[in-house]
Amino acid sequence: MTFLEITLFVISIYITLVLVRVIIGPTIWDRLLGLNAISAKIIMSIVIFSIITEQSYLLDVALVYALLGFIGTVLIARFIEKKGDIS
Amino acid sequence: MINLLAYLLITIALIFMALGVIGLFRFKDFYSRILISAKIETVGFLTIMIGFIILSGLSYATMKIILITTMVMITNPLSTHAIARSAFLSGYPINQETQP
């Protein structure tokens, strides 16, 4: 087991722990914060997997995931603004 | 020798992200949690990506990693700010125990 595979394993554990925060989050903004944190960790995972398997086209997937995660977070945050408690 | 530096940077980034995950459960106020998430996630992402850039050497794929790093460095604080603004304008209550 190389160093990068251990790194991928540790990041998977972090994603699982943040997912607990998403599940028990009291309101929808806590869940959105967890979604933002998971999105950044998934981008790291894709880059690590691309370096391990030496397939550089997977980096394009990470780039598109970064853009779509940003657009999704901002869109949901603007949509639920001033709409009351809909958690 | 240069790989050892990259491994050291990746280990530091993993410690940063562990602190961020602990802080996400440790704090009872939403605004404290979002402060931790905004700072620690960006710093951990930047550190681990610099480690990957050193590890993969100078090639075509390194430019893509630099592009991803620049984009996430710009967009991650923006999306966290959008979440905090949405919560504040919607009247998310500030915890009285942690209010200064």
Image (cartoon, coloured by chain):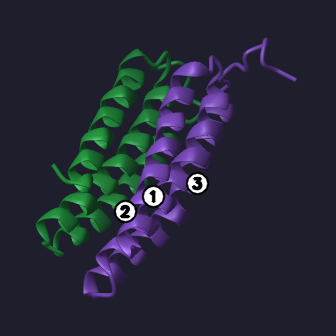
Chain colours: A green, B purple
Question: Which residue corresponds to the image point at 67% horizontal and 30% vertical from the top-left?
Answer: B31
Residue at the extreme top of the image, as rendered? B97
For label 1, the SS is helix
Please name the residue shown 36% across and 53% down the image. A69
**Mark 3 — residue?**
B77
Three-letter residue code for mark 2 = Leu
Front disc: 1 or 2: 1
Residue holding disc 1: B8
Q: Residue visible at 48% across and 32% down? A: B21
Q: Secondary structure at mark 2?
A: helix
Picture disc at residue A67: 2
Mark 3 and mark 1 lie on one chain; the one further toward the N terminus is 1
What chain letter is assigned to the residue under label 3? B
Image mark 1: chain? B
Bin the neighbour count of mark 3 within 10 Å (Cα to Cα): few under 14, some 14-19, many 20 and up. Answer: some
Graded by Cα atoms within 10 Å as few (under 14), some (14 to 19) or many (20 or more), the crowding at tag 2 reads some
Q: Tell me the distance, in whole angstroms, between the alpha carbons under discs 3 and 1.
A: 25 Å
Choose mark 3 or mark 1, whichever is in front: 1
Q: Amino acid at mark 1?
A: Leu
Counting from the top left corner in percent of width and height, residue A86 is at 46, 20
Seen as rendered, the residue at the extreme right is: B100
Q: Secondary structure at mark 3?
A: helix
Q: Is residue A80 visible?
A: no
User: Looking at the figure, which quarter contains the N terminus of chain B?
Assistant: bottom left
The percent coordinates of residue A44 (x first, y second) are: 33, 55
Q: Is residue B96 left or right of residue B89?
A: right
Q: Is residue B82 above or below residue A17?
A: below
Identify whether B86 is placed above or below B100. Answer: below
Outermost residue to the bottom = B59
Please state the horizontal and vertical placement of residue A6, each as a whole percent of the image: 25, 46
